[in-house]
Image: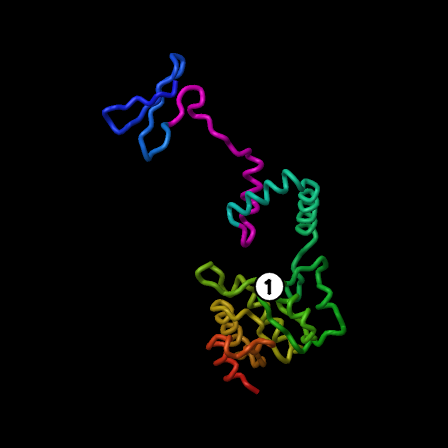
């Protein structure tokens, strides 16, 4: 067997034994679809494994291929780590809640920072997420209290003032204790819109509002800084 039999058409067929059917190919199109017992047989993903991949895809920055690689790694090589991860997630979801005063994640009704007597209650810093709050804390430059929006205004994503607790923020900022609100939302389009809306709301109530300064990063060389940052640094010089 194995002889090629030329056909009048562009197809090329291989002849085999009496028990083997003739298999024909069209050049440029690969082999014909399998026939017989193999026809219709395809590998299927177990439902539980597909559920795991779908759950991993929901995480930020994780695409379909990355989710599949992580799932295979957890199931094949890191089952103990996977079990620990599942328990940690379950424990976090069970214990964590929003602080009643600042909205950050906490295991108690009032978080440790809000309950601290060492913080300055006259200064209130507004951030978008708990991650932003942690970054500011690590700087060691702020000794006041926080309000965490848990988001930012983004009409395209269906996020408005009500979804980021602006009413609660206004009540907190006008309680008679706060003297200045520092806006530390991100310098993105959504962050700037959020800062603008908050500024208008609070200034209408007579609250002093300031914004984090923008400028040239420490250690950078001027010729490599983008023009917009240089312009902002010039305007906010001191």
Residue drawn at x 43%, y 25% as measured from the top left:
40
State the residue in front, 72 or 139. Answer: 72
Q: Start and end of the magenta stretch?
A: 33-62
Residue at the right extreme, as displayed: 117
Q: Is residue 182 in the magenta section?
A: no
Residue at the top extreme, as displayed: 18
Would residue 36 appear left or right of 186 to someone viewing this image? Answer: left
Q: Where is residue 10 in the image (x, y as percent from the top left)?
A: 26, 29
Q: Position of residue 237 (x, y in %)?
A: 55, 85
State the residue in front, 237 or 34. Answer: 34
State the residue in front, 80 or 47. Answer: 80
Q: Is residue 58 above or below residue 233?
A: above
Look at the image and tell me in which quarter the C terminus lies. Answer: bottom right
Residue drawn at x 28%, y 23% as measured from the top left:
6
Mark 1 lies on residue: 129
Q: Is residue 61 in the magenta section?
A: yes
Would residue 152 appear left or right of 174 to someone viewing this image? Answer: left
């Amino acid at each position: 067997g194995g002889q090629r039999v030329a056909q009048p058409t562009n197809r090329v067929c291989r002849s085999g034994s009496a028990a083997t059917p003739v298999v024909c190919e069209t050049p440029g199109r690969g082999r014909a679809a399998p026939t017989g017992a193999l026809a219709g047989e395809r590998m299927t993903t177990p439902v539980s494994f597909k559920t795991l991949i779908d759950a991993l895809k929901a995480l930020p920055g994780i695409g379909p291929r990355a989710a599949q690689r992580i799932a295979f790694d957890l199931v094949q090589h890191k089952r103990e780590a996977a079990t620990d991860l599942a328990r940690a997630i379950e424990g976090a979801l069970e214990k964590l809640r929003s602080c009643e005063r600042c909205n950050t994640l906490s295991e108690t009704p009032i978080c440790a920072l809000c309950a601290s007597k060492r913080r300055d209650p006259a200064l209130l810093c507004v951030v978008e997420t708990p991650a932003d709050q942690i970054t500011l804390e690590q700087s060691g430059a702020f000794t006041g209290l926080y309000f965490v929006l848990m988001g930012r205004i983004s009409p395209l994503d269906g996020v408005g003032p009500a979804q980021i607790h602006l009413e609660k923020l206004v009540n907190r900022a006008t309680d008679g204790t706060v003297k200045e609100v520092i806006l530390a939302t991100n310098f993105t389009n959504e962050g700037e819109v959020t800062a603008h809306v908050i500024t208008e709301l609070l200034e209408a109530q007579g609250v002093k509002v300031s914004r984090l300064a923008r400028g040239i990063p420490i250690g950078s060389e001027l010729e490599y800084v983008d023009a917009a940052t240089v312009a902002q640094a010039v305007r906010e010089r001191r």
